[in-house]
Amino acid sequence: MKVRLNLSTTPQQNRRPFIAAAVLTGVIAIVALVVLSRAAYISWNSNREVRADIATLQEQIRQSSANQTELASYFRSPAARDTLDRANFLNSLIDERSFPWTDIFQSLEQTLPDGVRVVSISPKLVNGRAELKLVVGAVDDQQKVRFLKAMETSKSFSNLQITAERHSLQTAGNADPLDQIMLDLTVDYQTI
């Protein structure tokens, strides 16, 4: 019979659990390294595409800025300014021709009471609506009040604002009776 004797001073230790745990930890670390490396590569690759897109867009912005600078210098040239001035003048003529003069005068005729007259009228188109600046002469305060009430109740005129009122101190023999009170006002006109 054979007897196994351990003559060493310390007994031999079982290192198998440590080796198994170390191998398992190493495998997990290698798998994590592969997964993270793949994720980093995918991220780098997609960022490379984004960086290429950004570079393309920056080039387009640079070209657009150069074009804008070139166009701005062209529009500052005397020839372009003359053309723009001519176009603005022609557009103003077209706006005047398309202004509803007859409708305005018909609406004023229906609105004006006796003893009140329009001395001057200055229209302009603002955002597709007609804004009128009127200078109106009235015989007395009663006619002025009747005119203002008629303007406020009119369906054609809105947003009445009186900008100035002047009273004439002329003698009755020399003065035109219609110009005793002068009103400066602005009003919006809309067709019915």
Image (spheres, helix red, strand yellow):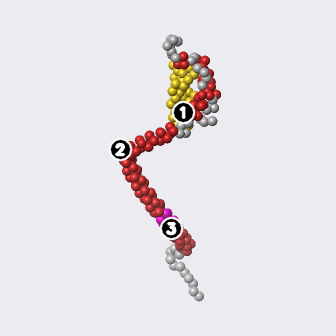
Callout count:
3
Kind of residue sitting beneath label 1: Glu
Disc sitting over residue 105 in the figure: none
Q: Position of residue 175 (x, y in %)?
A: 51, 15
- Camera sees residue 42: yes
Q: Which residue is mark 3?
A: 38
Q: Is residue 10 magenta?
A: no
The residue located at (43%, 59%) in the rendering is 56
Q: Is residue 76 left or right of residue 19?
A: left
Q: Which residue is mark 1?
A: 131
Local crowd size for mark 2, using a 10 Å CA cut-off: few (<14), some (14–19), many (≥20): few
Q: Is residue 43 magenta?
A: yes
Local crowd size for mark 1, using a 10 Å CA cut-off: few (<14), some (14–19), many (≥20): many
Q: Which residue is mark 2?
A: 78
Q: Considering only vertical position in the picture, is 185 above or below 3?
A: above
The residue located at (37%, 50%) in the rendering is 70
